[in-house]
Image: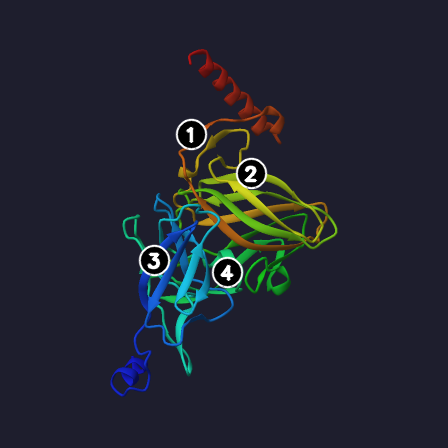
Amino acid sequence: MAYAAMGLVYGEYETYTAPTLKNAEIKEGSIYVSFNNIGNGVKSKGDTVYGFALCGKDGVYVQANAEIIAENSVRIWSENVAEPCSASYAYCVSNQRANLYATDENGFAMPVSPFVTDKNYNTHFYKDKIWVDCEDEFIWHTETDALSNFYSSWTGENVVLSAAENDAFSGTKGMNIKATDKSFSVSPIVTYQDGNNVEPFFDTDTDYSDYSEMSFYVKNNGENEAVFEGVKFTKDSVFWYTAFSGEVIPADGAWHKITVNLNRVHLFGNECGFGYTNERLDNVVNIEFMFTSLSDNSDIGFDCVRFTPSTEKVSAGFDADVADADNAFEFVSALFVRFIGLFANLFS
């Protein structure tokens, strides 16, 4: 407010009001936006432009890439939204990293105002998943309407975690995972302790039912191959679902993209049981990425978690195979669902 007063009343700054959306154009899988009140041009604080999201005709917003292409223009795109319909900027409950500003002869001036380019597509506050970029070891979270604090961005089992430049697939840093056991896992911190209760942060998205896929990049810095077993989604203290993978991460020091199908998740991790759809992931309070290795000293780079909106409805089904059973419970489950499937086919 002081900056605005110095410009508006005393004429010290020409950029006394924030940049606002001027125009938006959809072209070749991207949305191009331009701004008013830019001073000497828009610029980001940091090499990567943050704060943008995109949606297709389904109205499901996902984090988007952005680049400044002219002094008053930004291109916005996402490989997970092939035909974007609307873009938003800093349009969420608590956006701590939107970093686009006007500039003047003194450097950074006023920040760009939040906006949505087309409000015909399910416009709502987008809850920014800051943890997906693995940039910071600590994240500022809003606990309630009134309370906020810094929290660790990730935690894990049988691991030592750190943010490292050498493990960045994009941006300035990625997450380095040093395992202390053959079985290890990492989880973003999305809840806090409120007395005896565990509550999701006010600014944290708990609904993953609109996503058909989750993808991320891993790099094996060690000498032995590792295996990404899958992702465990916990809904509460009773129910949890697992999306299995089993993808091998070779010890080649190269980045590999892993994609997990969220339209086939299994209750209590029973891979030989009934296969559920992403509709079960509507109130998630914890996400756990699970790994195994032949050694107890794996060194993994982990970065750039992204989500793909669901474009079609997928039915739950009986997809168990007796050969996949790892224990007696799964073996019995596989026989049961196979029997149910054969019985259903007789009357189909």
- Residue at image position (34%, 58%) is 24
Looking at the image, is mark 2 or mark 1 nearer the viewer?
1
Q: Mark 3 points at which residue?
A: 24
Query: Circle 3: is it few (<14), some (14-19), or many (20+) Cα within 10 Å?
Result: some
Q: Can residue 176 be seen in this view?
A: yes
Which mark is first along the chain, 2 or 3?
3
List the single residue furthest toward the top: 346
Give yes or no for contact between labels 4 and 2 (Cβ–Cβ under 8 Å).
no
Q: What element carries label 4?
A: loop
Identified by mark 3, the residue type is Ala
- Residue at image position (55%, 32%) is 271
Which mark is first along the chain, 1 or 3?
3
Q: Mark 4 points at which residue?
A: 153
Looking at the image, is mark 4 or mark 3 nearer the viewer?
3
Looking at the image, is mark 3 or mark 2 nearer the viewer?
3
Q: Residue 93 carries which label?
A: none
Q: In this view, does 214 lie to the left or right of 185?
A: left
Where does residue 219 sit, x and y in percent of width and height? 64, 53
Identified by mark 4, the residue type is Ser
Position above or below: 222 against 248: below
C-alpha gap between disc 3 and disc 2: 40 Å
Which mark is first along the chain, 1 or 4?
4
Which mark is first along the chain, 1 or 2?
2
C-alpha gap between disc 2 and disc 1: 17 Å
331, 102: nearer the viewer: 102
* Quarter-of-image position of residue 162: bottom right
Give the position of the C terminus as an image quadrant: top left
Position above or below: 329 against 11: above
C-alpha gap between disc 4 and disc 1: 34 Å
Colour convention of the picture: rainbow
Query: Circle 2: is it few (<14), some (14-19), or many (20+) Cα within 10 Å?
Result: many
